[in-house]
Image (cartoon, grey):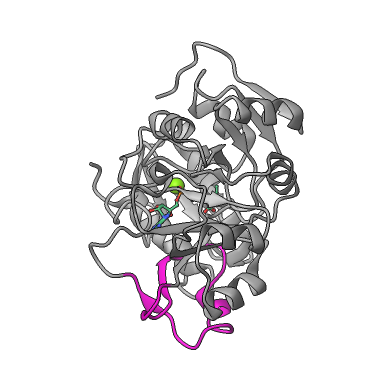
Amino acid sequence: MTGTDQPLTVKENDLERALQILQEGGLVGMPTETVYGLAADATDARSIAHIYAAKSRPQFNPLIAHVDSLASAQLQGVFDSRAIALAKRFWPGPLTLVVPVNETATVAELARAGLPTIGLRVPAHPIARELLERFGKPLAAPSANPSGRISPTSAGDVAGAFGAEVSLVVDGGRSRAGIESTILSVLPGEPVRLLRPGAIPRESILEVVDALAEAVAGEVSAPGQLSSHYAPSAVVRLNAATPRRGEVWLGFGPACRTADANLSSSGDLVEAAANLYQMLRMLDTAGAATIAVAPIPSTGLGEAINDRLARAAAPRR
Ligand code: TXA
Ligand code: MG
């Protein structure tokens, strides 16, 4: 799905126009500090339906509602003391909390895919924040990539992936974190669960909660129930200490001097996360048949990076 029938407007900070499109039920590419989102009015089922259509996303996959503050989030979801502590520590920022839906919620049921829970996040990117404050309603925004493909970390990535369905992408520069938010569920009578490793490492979460349980297998969690996801067109081979003939090599650390691209030559996992999607996209666009990826340690942000790489390398649907 690379509709190129109409050129997409990519404008620097054109918020008036973005707000108007959102009011009219349209889709706007929105910068966030993690990846770019495909934003729509979360309270309007028709707008939500446009997101699913544009992403070719299975309807059972619920969307994250972005809000401007913890107070706004609490209108949508029920926050217990653990959820409040996590929100106070990490919002605004790359943490999504899945909590029970509040009876005062205005987010359309379609955005939650009919679940009794809701995923909420207060993003930190200044343009996302300004959009949310001025729009005055939650914005549903999944990552702005067609389902299963590499997530976008620049306005140009969004523009290249969608055609006329997305009439505006607000250019907020390269996404700082470059990897999606960490998703936790905080539900009554249950331990806090890690549904998706992401830009906030497990170690930081454990400074706020006593224990972190894993997602329950088979439940709607995040994203894509493993299988193929975040996939480039090329085959991806993991833990490649050296490339084989014909492969391009995505390195990590100072030992990978001959790599075609290096996620971080100094071995910095934060830098690697920020570069991950952009470098996969770059090697893929260059026409590689196989991308061999050097081993990445699994501490800190390495957990999220290895999670995304495992999905990129999974057998394709
Ligand atoms: O960093 C991010 O989180 C980006 C930016 C744009 O905010 N958004 C993002 O959205 O990654 P998306 O839709 O690509 O991934 C959100 C994941 C989905 O896989 C979905 O299954 C999960 O969040 N999710 C949302 N609401 C949920 C809920 N009520 N229960 C379980 N999982 C939920
Ligand atoms: Mg996504």
Q: Is residue 179 visible?
A: yes
In this rendered view, identify the residue nearer to me: 295 or 56. 56
Residue 156 appears at what percent x and percent y? Answer: 61, 31
Residue lying at the far top in this picture: please name it: 5
Q: Residue 63 appears at what percent x and percent y?
A: 44, 48
Please tell me which residue lies in front, 5 or 191. 191
In this view, the residue in front, 48 or 276, is 48
- Residue at image coords 49%, 29%: 161
- Count of numbered tags: 0
Pick out the residue farthest to the front: 103
Which residue is found at the position 34% from the left and 55% from the top?
A: 115
* Quadrant placement of the N terminus: top left
**Coordinates of residue 76 in the picture (x, y in percent):** 53, 57
Residue 46's spot in the image, x, y percent?
45, 30
Say if residue 272 shows up in the picture: no
The reply to whether the magenta stretch includes residue 192 is yes
| Up-down relation of residue 313 to residue 297 (above or below) | above
Q: Quadrant of residue 50?
A: top left
Q: Tell me: 214 left or right of 273.
A: left
Quadrant of the rendered image containing residue 123: bottom right
Q: Main secondary structure of the magenta part?
A: loop
Residue 158 on the magenta span: no
Q: Which residues are magenta?
A: 187-215
- Depicted 129 relative to depicted 147: above or below: below
112 relative position to 134: left or right: left
Which residue is at a point 54% across and 77% down the rendered structure image?
A: 205
